[in-house]
Image (cartoon, rainbow, N blue to C red):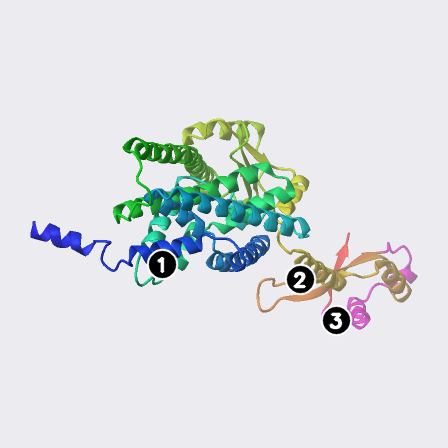
Amino acid sequence: MGIIKKVFEFIDLHSGEEEKNKVLENVRSNTSFRGSNLWILACAIAIASIGLNVNSTAVVIGAMLISPLMGPIVGAGFALGTYDFELLKKSLKNLIIATLVGLLVSALYFYMSPFKEAQSEILSRTSPNIYDVLIAFFGGLVGVIAVTRVEKGNPIPGVAIATALMPPLCTAGYALAIGNYVFLAGSMYLYTINCVFICIATFIIVKYLKYPIAKIIAQKDEAKIKNYIYLLIFVMIIPSIYFAYQLFQEKSYYLKVNSFIEKEFTNNGHTLIYKNINFNSNPKEIKLAFLNEKFSKDKLKSFNQKLKEYSLNNSLLMIKQDTFNLKDDILNELKFYKIKDDKEVIINKLKSELEIYKFDNTQLIKEVGAVFPNVENVSLAFHSFYQDTDSTKIIPVLVVKKREITTKEEQKDSIDEKKLVDWMKQRLHYNEVLLYYKD
């Protein structure tokens, strides 16, 4: 029993606790959104919106640190825990004001911003799940425990970052600005989850620490308040569990697809150059493309039948084998990347290499014909020898077709190979020329 008592003393929250009256006074003062608090909130919203717009995590975190949004939420939790309905009205009123200001400022910013693309920082705030509920609840616990301490310490900034009230509110403003109501519903649901579960966590700690009740209420009314809280928890958690299940299903599906690709293609020497998985379509789509691989219709049918062996039901495998369509798809996937400069570098490099091999054969035939009458036709090409070694070099290769000799006079003028090669070296400014005859 002595050990158990010491353990409870070790984890007792009453140790280091601030005077309850001082805590309540601070909570009441932090619920207000007038003057400086309102300006700070508007500036924090603007900073968070810019961070979301340029996809900067650091800027978003900075906005969360200066946001005063936690004040009325913690105030509502204290009000429920102490049955202070005046404080509850004030907290809810100020939370509504703060929410409307946040939506207005963020929507105005995104409406004026030339960049309307939904970045990853925005997209991550549109699909809440049960994990967001847990983060909000435990973050709220840490926050209210810190508020009730004599020494506040470091938890408060960490709670502001973990619970992330600002980003979903700004994402909702973004959704309003572009008219995307799916994003609006998702981000406002996440914002509501954070508010509700921070408030509930606060209510639990306030009850545990036995803060003085502001108003004596009947036991029946007290039970009614608790029932409302339970109902609110249920309403908030059920959709989040569903979304978490959907997330689990999606991640599991991606793992199965990757296993299918690895075992059926990669391990068999097929080089994958393109992959696009659409989990939300019906049937689910798996689009692939391979380097220099062509599959017959029967083979494609066989691959689709194998999907069931990997528990990839209701799925359709499509392998792109049209190089022109493949090119368009790959370029569309790379639309967020700057590839123009790279393409220009490659084009210029190819142009410079082509210049080496470029030569006017028509002019050459005329010149050779004038110097060597028994040459009927001539062709010149530049070939690379000893490639991929330190001795790589380009040598002109001359292919000559002799004129048929019909008279003794023409026989006298037969082609002098050495003279032709030496002449060609001078003409092309090369130290080496290879000569071949065409039959």
Magenta-drawn segment: 403-432
Q: Residues within 10 Å of mark 2 (few under 14, many from 20)?
A: few
Label 1 or label 2, whichever comes before in sequence order? 1
**Measured from the top left, where is residue 236 in percent x and y?**
42, 36
**Measured from the top left, where is residue 47 in percent x and y?**
56, 58
Which residue: 41% across, 42% down? 196
Which residue: 87% across, 58% down? 362
Which dot, 1 or 2, sits closer to the camera?
Answer: 1
- Apparent side of residue 304 relative to residue 412 in the rendered image (left or right): left
- Apparent side of residue 177 relative to residue 206 in the rendered image (left or right): right
Front in this rendered view, residue 64 or 305? 64
- Apparent side of residue 187 relative to residue 78 in the rendered image (left or right): right
**Measured from the top left, where is residue 254 in percent x and y?**
46, 39
Quadrant for residue 20, please give it.
Answer: bottom left
Q: Is residue 34 visible?
A: yes
Q: Which residue lies under the disc numbered 2?
A: 384
Q: Which mark is residue 430?
A: 3
Q: Which mark is residue 155?
A: 1
Front in this rendered view, residue 412 or 299? 299
**What amino acid is found at the position of numbered circle 1 in the picture?**
Pro
Label 2 or label 3, whichever comes before in sequence order? 2
Which residue: 64% across, 50% down? 108
**Measured from the top left, where is residue 4 in percent x and y?**
12, 50
The kind of secondary structure element at disc 2 is strand
